[in-house]
Image (spheres, rainbow, N blue to C red):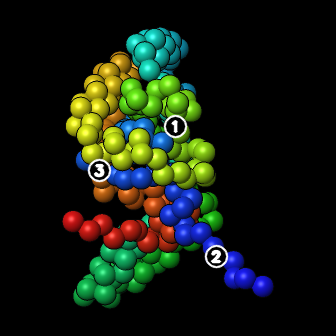
Amino acid sequence: MPAIKGKASQDFVPIREIRDGIVITEDGNMHMVLMASSLNFALRSADEQEAITSQYQNFLNALDFSVQVMIQSRRLNIEPYLENLRAAEKNQINELLKIQTREYIEFVRSFVETTKIVRKSFYIVATFVPPFLAGGAKGIGSIFTGLFGRKETASAKKLEDEKFEEYKTQLWQRVETISGAIAGAGVRTAPLNTEELIELYYGLFNPGELERGHAPQIRG
C-alpha cells in the first residue's frame, strides 16, 4: 500500500505574504487590519446612544467599498503579570511583605481561573482587489473566513512584483477613509504592523498557544 503524503500546515493558510503591514492572500487581494477601540454603549445616556448610532450610520454610508469586522474573544493570559509578582516576591526582604505578595499571587491566579476572564479585541479589515482580479476574484476574499483551498496563482506573483507600491497607496486611502469616518462614533483605530499581524494570525491558527504565553519568534 503506497504511503499517504500529508499536506503541510502552510497549505491550509490562505496567506501568501505579509509585507509592510499588508496581508497578500493567495487570490492576489491585499488587506490591512485595523485594531479598533471599544466603547460601552450600555452606559451611555439615551442622547449619546442616539448620536453614536447616527455617527455609525454615517460611517457605513461613507464607504464605497466593502469592509470586514471581526471580534476576537480570548481568555486573558496573566502569566507574565504573575511572573513579575513572583520576581518581586523573591527579591522582597521584608518577610511579611513576601507572605502578602505570595498570597496575592495565589488570589489573582485562582480568581482568573474560576471566573475565566475574557479579553475582546475588535478589528476592521480594509481590502483592495487589484483591477486585473476584479472580474475573476470571488468577492473581496475574506482573510478570517474561508481558510481552506489554497491556490498558487500567477496573478498573485504579478501583484507582488509589479504593482505592490501602487496598490498599497490605494489601500492606505481606504484605511484613512475608515479611520476618519469611524472616529465620529468615538472609535479610534490603528493599523497593525507586520509583526502584530504575524502574532494575530499565529493566534488564529494556533488557538490556545497565546493563552499559554507562547508567541511566534519574529525575525528581523
Which residue is drawn at the image coordinates 56% and 59% (left, top)?
12
In front of the other: 164 or 58 = 164
Q: Is residue 46 above or below residue 1?
A: above
Which residue is drawn at the image coordinates 34% and 52% (left, top)?
18
Amino acid type for the residue under numbered disc 3: Arg
Image quadrant in which the N terminus is located: bottom right
List x then y, in percent, for residue 19. 29, 50
Say which label, 3 or 2, has the lower sequence index. 2
Q: Which mark is residue 205?
A: none
Instruction: Classify residue 19 as left or right of residue 54.
Output: left
For the question of whether residue 151 can be seen, the reply is yes
Residue highlighted by disc 3: 19
Say which label, 2 or 1, has the lower sequence index. 2
SS for callout 1: loop
In front of the other: 215 or 133 = 133
Q: Is residue 17 above or below residue 33?
A: below
Amino acid type for the residue under numbered disc 1: Gly
Q: Number of numbered discs present?
A: 3
Mark 1 residue crowding within 10 angstroms, few (<14) / some (14–19) / many (20+): many
Residue highlighted by disc 1: 141
Image quadrant in which the C terminus is located: bottom left
Which residue is drawn at the image coordinates 69% and 82% (left, top)?
3
Instruction: Between label 2 and label 1, give the one nearer the viewer.
Output: 2
Q: Is residue 212 above or below residue 154?
A: below
